[in-house]
Image (spheres, rainbow, N blue to C red):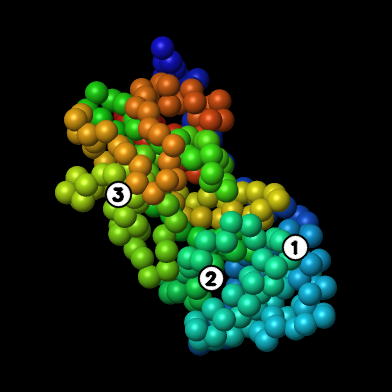
Amino acid sequence: MNALTPSTLAALEEMLQNTARSVPADYVPIYLAIPTASKLGQTVGYLQGDFFAFIKQSLQASPITGIHLEPQRLLVSGERPALLSQTWNALARRMREGGFIPGWRNEEFAFLDQQGHALFQLERAAFRTFGLKSMASHMNGFTEDRRIWLGRRSENKHIDPGKLDNLSAGGISADETPWVCARRELWEEAGIPQAIAAGIQPAGRMEMRRPTPPLGFHAESLFIYDLLIPSNLLPTNRDGEVAGFIAVTHGEAAARILADEFTADAALVTADFILRRNIS
């Protein structure tokens, strides 16, 4: 039986101190120029070097309105969200045709500025390619006897097939709130009835930043929720994205995290749950 030793808890704490990693020096920044009364623009994403080389060659052959090449960065200009969305999606389609955006979902995420305003919407699969920050909701399902429900991702998933995940988790679509996403994912991924899903408890927010070659740079805000799962309820997947579920002790969950059996995001969310529940 796996025990939660002081060294195990210390290892989990160290993980949580490294959720936001630096952008590699060879990544090219993407600058969004949106002149307003309060600011001139901001760096919003990062491109791997080979991505930038492809875009440079592509734009020289066939320019895209609103996309400008500079020696050490890519500049996207515009003001209205609708026009910016058109510009970004045109660039994303160009990247998809070049084979740089696998797993196209036909679903859009919104990019939010620091004030929470949606500046544009873009195909979700392109966010990692461009290093744009997305958002996701993650749900810790726990039981009265101190176990944690974990899902195992389907082998058909494009990213992290077969890895352990939280009870449910998913990207927050454009025009969707973290709360709505959390309850939707609980039903789609784990078959949790709405009457029970209504009991989710907000448990924090975490910022994740890490290079994920060859896919790009993963930047995401993780909205974390806890949910007590009744002893007579067995999670059941409904959308084909989860292969199955297991309920494990805190100690076993920690051991599996340290053995690299989890997705990177779920490992951090589960580690945070274990620490909150075991350190007074």
Mark 2 surroundings: few (<14), some (14-19) or many (≥20) residues within 10 A: many
Question: Could you give the CA–CA distance between mark 3 and mark 1, rounded to whole angstroms?
Answer: 37 Å
**Residue drawn at (70%, 61%) of the image:** 100
Q: Secondary structure at mark 2?
A: strand
Which label belongs to residue 122?
Answer: 2
Amino acid at circle 1: Phe
Distance between mark 3 and mark 2 Cα atoms = 25 Å
**Residue 255 percent across, percent down from the top left:** 48, 23
- State the SS at label 1: helix
Q: Which residue is mark 3?
A: 187
Is 236 or 197 nearer to us in this picture? 236
Looking at the picture, tell me which residue is in the foreground, 37 or 224: 224
Q: What residue would you read off at disc 1? A: 51
Mark 2 or mark 1, earlier in chain: 1
Q: What residue is at 24 percent from the left and 23 percent from the top?
A: 145
Circle 2: residue type: Leu
Q: Position of residue 162 (x, y in %)?
A: 53, 36
